[in-house]
Image (tube, rainbow, N blue to C red):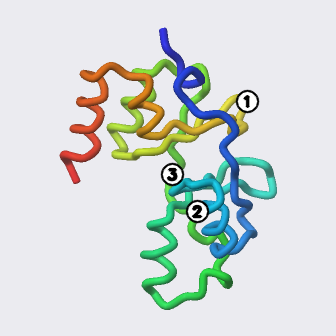
Amino acid sequence: MTKARDVMHMGAECVNEDESLLTAAQMMRDLNVGSLPICGNDDKLHGILTDRDIVIRVVAEGRNPADVRAGELAQGTIRCVDADADVEQVLQTMERNQIRRLPVLENRRLVGMISEGDLARNLSEHQLAEFVEAVYARR
């Protein structure tokens, strides 16, 4: 059976909770990604930061991204899966929570991320269609 580790992309880079959102945005640009995991000084995952978070929750409110720390936007329940979780559990977690990116942990440490692109490369057309319908139809 296909596991999360089989479909994830390895080496997800974190932005530290104490880094500014300006730094986070520059990391996103340099890595060509739309989100970054937020990791704490305790070396644990604290949340996910998206480019949309920066625009809606900071820039649109007139706040300076250089003055806001990434950790300030780490809110809510973190949705993640274990590296040994089967792909069905991955899909259920993403569909149930209507999320498009999912951190993958091993021994409580971030080892990778699963994105829509990873799913598109690894799922059957039928599985992918069901995922898209579940995540986007309810919005």
Q: Mark yes or no: residue 134 visible.
A: yes
For label 2, the SS is loop
Q: Quadrant of residue 36?
A: bottom right
Q: Residue furthest bottom?
A: 62
The answer to whether marks 2 and 1 mark residues whose Cβ atoms lie closer than 8 Å is no
Mark closer to the observer (3, 2): 2
Q: Is residue 72 above or below residue 81?
A: below
Instruction: Tell me which residue sits at (52%, 25%) in the image.
Output: 7
- Quadrant occupied by the C terminus: bottom left
* Residue at (29, 33) in percent of width and height: 131
For badge 3, the amino acid type reads: Thr
Q: Is residue 71 visible?
A: no
User: Which percent across, then down, holds residue 41?
Assistant: 80, 57
Q: Tag 1 or tag 2, which sits nearer the N-term?
A: 2
For disc 2, the marked residue is 74
Q: Which residue is mark 1?
A: 107
